[in-house]
Image (cartoon, rainbow, N blue to C red):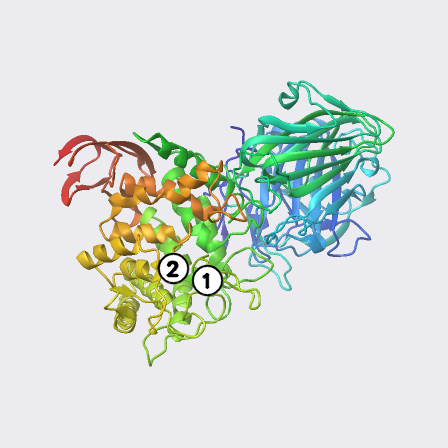
Amino acid sequence: MRRLLPFLFVVSFAGVALMAAPSPSGMPPTSERLLADSWPAHWIACPGVPRGEYGVFLFRKSFALATRPEHFVIHASADARYRFWINGHLLAVGPQRGYPAGWHYDSFDLAPWLTAGTNLLTARVISYGEYEPYSVMTQRTGLLVQGDTEAEDVVNSNESWKVVRDEGDSPVPIDQAHVPGYFAIGPGDRLDAALHPWGWKSANFDDHAWKPALALDRGIPWGHGTDIGTWLIPRNIPLPEETPQRLKSVRRSSGVTPREGFLDGKAPFAVGAHSHAVVLLDQGFETSAYPQLKVDGGRGSRIRISYAEGLMDAKGDKGDRDAIEGRELRGIADEFLPDGGDDRHFAPVDFRTFRYVQLDIETADAPLVVKDFSGVFTGYPFQREATFSSNDPQLERVWDVGWRTARLCAYETYVDCPYYEQLQYVGDTRIQALISLNVAGDDRLVRNAIDLLDHSRIADGLTQSRYPSVMPQIINTFSLFWIEMVRDYWMHRSDDAFVRARLPGVESVLGWFERKIDPSTGLLGPLDYWSFVDWTKEWNWDGARGIGGEPAGAREGGSAIISLQLAGTLDHAAELCRAFGRADQAEHYEKLAASLKSAVMKQCWDEKKRLVADTPARQVFSQHANAFAVLCGAVKGDEARDLMQRVARDPSLVQASTYFRFYLLRAMKSAGLGDEYLEMLGPWKTMLDRGLTTFAEQPDPTRSDCHAWSASPIYEFMATVCGIEPAAPGFAVVRIEPHLGRLTQAHASLPHPNGPIEVQLNRDGDALQATVVLPANLTGTIVWHGKSVALRPGTQTLRMP
């Protein structure tokens, strides 16, 4: 696996100041002079281009060196996005997504690619204009390059750089009449080869007609200056992975028959003049990649490249994702218009998510040779450090597909879905963060997400539901899940300074909810914003109000579901406050949580049905209210077990979707029903049977075939099936309580900050033989059928009746 430039990095953003301190992004440090004052370099742009207009801009800077230096560190950023090269070597795709008061820059040591004599820096920068993705909070169109010391100031961005607008590049808007769904991503890419300056990245390219760059304001580090458009902070996560990837098969074609070996890059195929050819390609699994098209000739041709997660029938249904008969590709698209030249290479500015790709080729007076089509996979560079196996091979399919889902939903932030939105929603991100910690052992994107969402808080205290986002959206329940993310992180990592810095945000969110409690009922009153709980058919989208997923009582007051969710979060916030010396606040939260639980049980418990109703009217009953009742401890012990046994199998209740089943199944485990977890994986197995290679947003019919919140089983295989969970903050103690259900054998290893935790479980009837390996300085307990045995560092084998 190849990653872009694994540099050493020693700079971090601490929330209130920049400091030279170790950081995990893998980049060189920033000199003190650039942290203390405005940078000598300026943001630069193309002269004569209206601000906020769509465009792709090409920048060049030649500079001479007497000798090749041992180190040559620079810092670079762009608005909105860039690709950056030194002497033709790709440095990075970036910058990391942030927000105006925290705009990221990348740092590079160029020395390995420099030579004595003339060197060339080049960058391609895109301004999305009216087609701006929601996740890119752009302020200007421009490039910024700054040398780390005065010795490197020769590359600083100013009028010495040259720039041109790429007149060949234009947007391909998403045709939502053809591709239905809610989109928040940018447009497709159209490149007219006749207008593109081919060879512009080479040193011998003639750029005399290019314009000197327009110098705008200077780069400003975080916390300095006045009238700030952008404050700069260093990258705090690794650069995205970029790995070449080949498609699997040609599924069908018309007008041409691609030769065997084409998808290996070894057998070009030709499309004659005045012809129309269509080729449907299958990656074999869903992926996110930069498509790479290479052609010769074909002047006047048009190649439309369309991408889809699955094919659709005449009714718009996807059905079996492996099937192609009677189905067509309806997807977002790019276009390439060849100019007749040889070795033309087209790659869109942004990555595409797809399983299927269709090449729709129309030629004019000249034949076209399609030399190759492939992809370059991209995503956050997670590594799957955890392992899982069992005597049920289908679970390994769930494990693999769940991991692919998690990978495609992580880039420079977590994303809900890579095809439609690419937005970091709290509801998805909490589940993704747990997967990152337990399966990848990587906490960098987790910290980034918690910090970004903390900075998204609005004046009345709530976090935004997704961030970064140019379109503000507030889901009040997601602010509570952000607090749960903080607690999850606290339980998994010893990082007191980071968690302590989140406490003002925790208190801000809970203050908003406390002000919404109706003193006459003790329950939450009418709630502002969007009180999303789950996508269910009973709470589905209301087009007239432009909202959906809200349970009864959210708008009018008296929601048992959200009151119970608040109660559980208050208890967890109390743990945080008590741990960080805020005992009075902790006691207040505990009393408030107890009051909410009491009010719900008094007014919403239906003795006849023996269920918690969604409101005091006791007319609507859901799995959601009862799951939260157990999770927050309003119902405990044998009563909780009895309740969840009935709730899990009662079809008359409002049913939890794939997303909320994470909380439903957590409640079952809390009630002592963890051994039933594997029997509840029906929706995921159905997706496998339908040929999905990632887990979808919800059961068919579904919009997104790849959705972060549906990857939850791979977390639960660690935490529930093999039972490995932290028993103290910072994962200082481990508790292992397996719930094997029908399994007779399971093996797992989980990355822990001290080293891997490994368990080998073999069940014989009611007896368990367990071999457990704990890393140095980690102790814990293993629990089986209520019996606990202490664990020590090292290897131990136990037999538990």
Residue in the picture at 59% in, 60% down = 471
Where is residue 608 shown, x and y percent of the image?
A: 24, 68
Where is residue 4 shown, x and y percent of the image?
A: 57, 33
Regarding residue 732, the answer to whether it shows in the image is: no
Residue at the disc numbered 1: 539
Residue at the disc numbered 2: 654
Q: Camera-side residue: 39 or 427?
A: 427
| Quarter where residue 533 is shown | bottom left
Where is residue 104 shown, x and y percent of the image?
A: 58, 49
Residue in the picture at 31% in, 58% down = 627
Q: Are marks 2 and 1 in contact (CB under 8 Å)?
A: yes
Label 2, label 1: how far apart the Cα atoms are: 9 Å
| Quarter where residue 588 is shown | bottom left
Q: Camera-side residue: 368 or 72?
A: 368
Residue count near mark 2 (Cα–Cα under 10 Å), binned few <14, some 14–19, many ≥20: many
Task: Identify the secondary structure beneath mark 2.
Answer: loop
Mark earlier in primary sequence (2, 1): 1
Where is residue 637 shown, x and y percent of the image?
A: 18, 57
Amino acid type at circle 2 is: Val
Regarding residue 510, the answer to whether it shows in the image is: yes
- Asked if residue 602 lies left or right of residue 489, the reply is left
Above or below for 467 versus 754: below
Q: Quadrant of the C terminus?
A: top left
Q: Camera-side residue: 352 or 615?
A: 615
- Which numbered circle lies on residue 549? none
Amino acid type at circle 1 is: Trp
| Quarter where residue 397 is shown | top left
